[in-house]
Image (cartoon, rainbow, N blue to C red):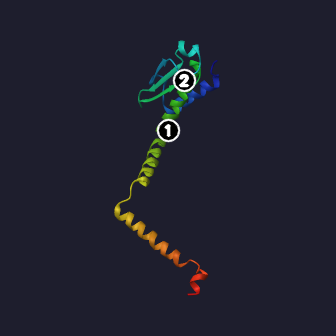
């Protein structure tokens, strides 16, 4: 199996757009794990790709072919570099922080205030209830 010329060209263009060169990658090949039979046990088809300036690392052993795994690893790593450059990582951190703040325990005063408001609301609702026939006759 081989990668089409269009896909290789697209990867090179994307690398140029992001300002990443091939020399910034450190690529190693290791043995894969999982299904694949004897091919997996004998050949090093898993690709480990590290972008040295950012320290981002990717391991890809999705396919049985080393060539396809090299392509996929580059694609995944470029996705991460792009997310890092566009600030998507910062947005994700902000969202996680927001969720953490929402889940944080309330202070005792805030809890008491909330429960007091709930009781007041409950009393209002009980006053709105229909009068039952048994209480009218008394």
Q: Residues within 10 Å of mark 1 (few under 14, many from 20)?
A: few
Q: In which quarter of the image is residue 117?
A: bottom left
Q: Quick one: 119 or 26, which is closer to the camera?
A: 119
Farthest residue to the bottom: give it: 138
Are the residues flagged by discs 2 and 1 in contact, CB closer than 8 Å?
no
Query: Where is residue 68 shown, x and y percent of the image?
Result: 59, 22
Tell me how far mark 2 sits from mark 1, CA to CA.
22 Å
Q: Quick one: 75 or 107, which is closer to the camera?
A: 107
Query: Where is residue 64 shown, x and y percent of the image?
Result: 59, 19
Q: Which residue is drawn at 59% across and 23% down?
A: 63
Q: Quadrant of residue 105?
A: bottom left
Farthest residue to the left: give it: 108
The image shows residue 65, relative to residue 122, as above or below, that is above
Q: How crowded is mark 2: few (under 14 residues within 10 Å), some or many (20 or more)?
A: many
Q: Tag 1 or tag 2, which sits nearer the N-term?
A: 2
Q: Residue at x 49, y 42 (%)?
A: 88
Residue placed under numbered mark 1 in the picture: 83
Secondary structure, mark 1, is helix
Residue placed under numbered mark 2 in the picture: 61
Q: Quick one: 125 or 100, which is closer to the camera?
A: 125
Q: In which quarter of the image is the N terminus?
A: top right
Q: Quadrant of the C terminus?
A: bottom right
The image shows residue 76, relative to residue 96, as above or below, that is above
Query: Where is residue 130 shown, x and y percent of the image?
Result: 59, 79
Left or right of 20, for residue 39: right
Secondary structure, mark 2, is loop
Query: Where is residue 133 shown, x and y percent of the image?
Result: 61, 82
Observer-side mark, 2 or 1, equals 2
């Amino acid at each position: 199996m081989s990668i089409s010329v269009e896909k290789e060209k697209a990867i090179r263009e994307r690398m140029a757009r992001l300002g990443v060169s091939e020399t910034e990658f450190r690529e190693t090949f290791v043995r894969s794990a999982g299904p694949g039979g004897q091919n997996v046990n004998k050949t090093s088809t898993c690709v480990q790709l590290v972008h040295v300036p950012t320290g981002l690392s990717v391991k890809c052993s999705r396919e049985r072919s080393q060539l396809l795994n090299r392509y996929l690893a580059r694609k995944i790593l470029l996705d991460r570099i792009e997310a890092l450059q566009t600030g998507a990582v910062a947005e994700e951190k902000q969202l996680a922080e927001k969720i953490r703040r929402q889940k944080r325990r309330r202070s005792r005063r805030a809890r008491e205030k909330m429960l007091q408001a709930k009781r007041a609301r409950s009393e209002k609702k009980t006053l709105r209830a229909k009068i039952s026939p048994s209480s009218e006759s008394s």
